[in-house]
Image (cartoon, helix red, strand yellow):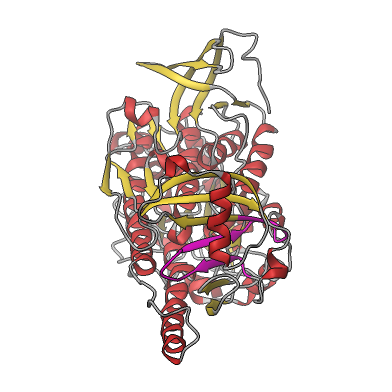
Amino acid sequence: MLVGRSDLDARLTTSVLIAGGGPCGLMLANELGRRGVSAILVDEKAGTAFNPQANATQARLMEHYRRLGFADEIRQAGLPADYPTDVAYFTRYTGYELARFQLPSSSRAPELIKGLSGSWSAAELPHRVSQKYVEAILCRYAERLPGIQLHYGRRLVSYVEHQDGIVGEIECPGDGRRFQVHADFLVGADGPRSSVRQSLGISYGGKTETQRDFMGGRMLAVYLRSPDFYASVPHAKAWMYNCFNRDRRAFMASVNGRDEFAFHTQLRPGEDESTITADEAKAAFQRACGAPIECDVLSFLTWTAGHALVADGMQRGRVFLGGDAAHLFTPTGGLGYNTAIEDAVNLGWKLASVVKGISPAALLDSYEIERRPVALRNTDYARRFADSLGLFAAAPEIEDATETASEARRLAGIYLEQHARAEFNIPGITFGGRYDGSPVIVSDGSAPPPDAANLYVPSACPGGRAPHAWLEDGVSLYDRFGFEWTLLQFVDGPSFDSSLSETARALGVDLKLVTLPKSLRDLYEADLALIRPDQIVAWRGSASDAGLLGRVLARALGHGADDQARLAS
């Protein structure tokens, strides 16, 4: 892993210091590096994740990976291309199958998405891939970018904020050597025990340590290798294996589709986590299997389910929080990692715009205003999914070979299939996060569509994701967007290439004009739509509003009323 010059220099200078090399920190490094903004990332770990951790990349994240140019590489990682991504429920893995929610393999996704509409009108479908693979790809792309330095095996031990920047003290834990990093901004993406959040005196708020029959309380996570698993289980393959009985509740994700699995089980009353051994972790897996299937334990640890926490603030001065440092989820719905990546996407273009002098520092105030309500929304959805699964208990007789048990299994299967559809078909959560009320969104007075987990209504109401469409040439509308700002213009509207160029040049912004068929106008319900770098609609208007574009763009860049008037003159 890149060490950079820290072994030689006592002082490094950069635009952004990132504490934390997980998904949020790595995505932020990519967003900044692609915009020519320097960043130094430090993380105490030796490298990217070894354990699988998160296992679901939602469609919105895949659209962002597409924007950065490596969605195909992400989709090829993890499971084999033809591996089903079903979510299945069993009494035990070798026992009775209760329910199955069928989902497509990754090889089908690129063509399947082109035939979908309505709630699933998107450039990408979700992908089931372990976080360890995603981190490795994010890391590989980030370290190729000029100005980006990744320093694993280093940790931020303290920092001082001055009027003109941050001075961070970095330590090499192996030998205690220290060096300084001088940066304009600091981003704490350093996990749930974030030292950066604690240094700011910011606490989590929300619900914590909720107790449930499952997904509430202490959990045991086991990363294991079992070459015999598939041959020993008399059921079709699945991506997610759920174990549902009165003895050992568990869920397990296939990591590579061959022999590696991420197994999680609820600790039962009386189980002392401090005394758990590798043999006991193996026994817990075999108990969920209902058979002595051989496995090698690669690693194991304990964690707490039942959190729905959001930091009371996400920024103070030149310091920002993202990822688990800002919000902590119970993993139902797979929303923690996905919310973390979108933090980085939102903050990345804003930091770059301020560092480059395009926007005033006031633009950065919109980060917390936009992202904290989404964090509250998403942690609440995850909590509801955990309640739905964890508060539903198995009948005592569910594993018996009796008619009563058979009926119990039938009823459980009905409930669990309904739950799976609710938890794993979530276009509303995936695409429906909004930034209403943000000072850099120009409202047109229209009302956004209702927020619902399982229903997404495409809308160009400013503050939400730009509605997607497949163009006649089979190209995604998103592939026509510029990397920075985009103005969509529908045919028969004004043609203002020269005035647009002058407006953009005055503001120092990279703005691409995209002319689209009139047939797409109904999708946006406007003649013009201004799209931010994160593919959010910042403004929409009629042809007669074209003269307002300079002020609209200035506001979207964070300029106050005085700045807007000056720039428009």
Span highlighted in magenta in the image: 238-261
Where's residue 403, x and y in %?
Answer: 45, 92
Q: Which residue is drawn at 37% across and 65% down?
A: 390
Up-down relation of residue 101 to residue 314 (above or below): below
Front in this rendered view, residue 383 or 511: 383
Q: How many numbered badges does the structure rendering display?
A: 0
Front in this rendered view, residue 362 or 24: 24
User: Left of 376 or right of it: where is 490?
Assistant: right
Where's residue 109, x and y in %?
Answer: 66, 68
Up-down relation of residue 180 to residue 294 (above or below): above
- The quarter of the picture where residue 273 lies is top left
Q: Which residue is drawn at 70% across and 54% down?
A: 77
- Specify whether residue 339 is in view: yes
- The quarter of the picture where residue 63 lies is bottom right
Q: Which residue lies furthest to the bottom in this view?
A: 403
Q: Residue at x 57, y 7 (%)?
A: 10
Front in this rendered view, residue 370 or 467: 370
- Specify whether residue 524 is in view: no
Magenta run includes residue 260:
yes
User: Left of 544 or right of it: where is 476?
Assistant: right
Magenta run includes residue 253:
yes
Locate the C terminus and report the quarter of the image it occupies.
top left
User: Left of 471 or right of it: where is 181?
Assistant: left
Q: Residue at x 53, y 11 (%)?
A: 178
Where's residue 286, x and y in %?
Answer: 58, 61
User: Left of 204 or right of it: where is 95?
Assistant: right
Up-down relation of residue 142 to residue 259 (above or below): above
Locate the N terminus and report the quarter of the image it occupies.
top right
Where's residue 62, x and y in %?
Answer: 59, 56
- The quarter of the picture where residue 105 lies is bottom right
